[in-house]
Amino acid sequence: MDSNNESIFKKYFSPESLRLAWERMVRSNGKDAKDFFGIDIYASNLDKNLTLLSEAIIKGEFKPQRPFKYYEPKASKTHRTKSVLSIEDSLVYQAIANTVATANYKRLAENNSFVFGSVLHPEVEKGNELLNDDEADFYFFEYYIPLYNKFINSVNTEIDNTNIRFKLETDITGFFDCIPHSKLLITLHKFGVEPEILDLLVDCLNLYSGTKESVTPGVGIPQGAAASFFFANVFLNDLDYLISQNGYTYYRYMDDIRIYEETEEKLTEVLVLIDNYLKGRALSLNTKKTSIEEISEDRESEKLPLLAGYGQELLEEYEIKKPNKEKQDYLNEQNPDNEQSKKYIVKTIEGDELIKFCKKDIKEAEEFLLNKFKDIEKTNFNARTLANDEELKKQIIHIAYKWRSANSILKTENRPILNEKLIPIWLFCAEHFFWKANHFCWNLNQYGANNLITQKLNELIPKFKSFEWVRYQILSNMANVQNFNSSELREIFRKAKEETSGLVRLGYYMILIKHLKSDHQLFASLRQAIRDDKEPYIKNRLSSYISRQTGSEKINEIKYWFGL
């Protein structure tokens, strides 16, 4: 590699740059799109691993890997493809995003009054210098709940404006999956990215793209990684500029676009403008979600609800007087069930006040749910009407989260409140709000072994045979709350061996690991089956699972056990 190329690669992939990428990767949103135990393994010798990776990239020896992919359902019963990148691929991808973001921070920040999705954290502008800060905030984006609420407040303000009579709502069809690499590279070149880095990036994206079954060379960026959200925003930067400079009242949250004007004609003009712009970049508007409508005279009914975060509610309830940074660190926690978040709450609101708050939330949740589902045991219970009420669904999902969060805190005090009357409700929701099945399975986990839960979840597995993510959530729950006899474990092992979905296979393996004793005759076969599994991600996830089950911190032993 010539000296010029070497200096370019050192700018993006020095050990310091990779360390910053590491700090951002471990804090990124989307726990289902991260290889947590792979992170633990890599962290056990972090400095050496980062140095070796840096040297490999600079020498041109780094080769991207195909990620683990699975299908996550949408409410429409279609799927989105989620990608779990290997640790080193995640670092390379994030390091490129970091360097581009630092160099173009001010340029992108100019749009922060009308672009709200994945807004860069102010500390991003510091680049690698952030590593020298004793109180560094490494988050790549600002916390999503306040950002989304800024978006909603902006929209609601326009609705309040009586001079505004019409609204345009639209989004982009299959946005992440359809971004053409050639157009993205052209955009990134305009943002100062060197051709050498673009060559590496396109090699990565070609492997990261596509479905489980096949790559789609030249098209698509992986959903789940923080870097993808950044590149998607960069890709739409010219559209942001085009619309705003033409004087339209425009707001965007990722690919969710809202525009408000006095006349229908103006909105028709801007719709054509957006449509033509996207077609020129091989994208298209989602016609089913595109509409121009007159705003109702009852403007309050047009307004959108704000998104509530449990931590924020706690902070607001008690007006906690903490240093701004500490408060921001908490609000930046993007995993609602993260142990660190719970510890922060417990530390911040102490003793009886915390218990009181959690009990109040659980009582309110119970009253709301038992009222809405009061006829659930009756044969004439109108499940379809309930499941089709969009606002009610959102409400129930949020309440389920609050119930779980409050009980998780009470559990640390050995005081969980588990009303068994809620079990049929959680089961109903897991079935009918299947795209959020994880939330309700997590709630069912709180109850431990229960015959009703066991029976119903076993019934749901064949019902969702086309939805691997739902089956995985159910199997994960069964691993924790169901007991299995020897013949049942043999049947599960047979299913695991025959299962083509890596995600579902992982669920079966979790059951077997939890319930097979080391002296069981199937144990050796299970160990060999896992060692022979062709998905490294599965081995890593199972290693993590074993570590949690046994309390083992002997990473090398676990690595050996699985042939890692």
Image (tube, rainbow, N blue to C red):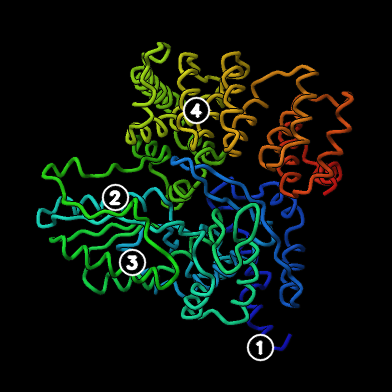
Label 2, label 1: how far apart the Cα atoms are: 47 Å
Question: In the figure, is residue 441 to the left or right of 110?
Answer: right
Q: Nearer the viewer, residue 339 or 226?
A: 226
Residue located beneath label 1 in the image = 4
For label 2, the SS is helix
- The three-letter amino acid code for the residue at tag 2 is Ile
Picture coordinates of residue 315, whole percent (x, y) = 38, 39
For label 1, the SS is helix
Of tags 3 and 4, which is closer to the observer?
3
Label 1, label 3: how far apart the Cα atoms are: 41 Å
Which numbered circle lies on residue 152? 2
- Name the residue located 76 percent from the left edge and 36 percent from the top edge: 498
Sequence-first tag of 2 and 4: 2
Residue located beneath label 3 in the image = 275
- Name the residue located 18 percent from the left edge and 65 percent from the top edge: 266
Residue located beneath label 4 in the image = 431
Label 2, label 4: how far apart the Cα atoms are: 30 Å
Crowd class of label 3 (few under 14; some 14 to 19; many from 20; radius 10 Å): some
Sequence-first tag of 2 and 1: 1
Sequence-first tag of 1 and 3: 1
Which numbered circle lies on residue 376? none
Label 4, label 1: how far apart the Cα atoms are: 58 Å
- Name the residue located 64 percent from the left edge and 21 percent from the top edge: 481
- Name the residue located 75 percent from the left edge and 51 percent from the top edge: 41
Circles 2 and 3, Cβ within 8 Å, touching? The answer is: no
For label 4, the SS is helix
Picture coordinates of residue 425, whole percent (x, y) = 45, 21
Sequence-first tag of 2 and 3: 2
Sequence-first tag of 4 and 1: 1
Crowd class of label 4 (few under 14; some 14 to 19; many from 20; radius 10 Å): some
Is residue 137 in sight in this rendering? no
Of tags 2 and 4, which is closer to the observer?
4
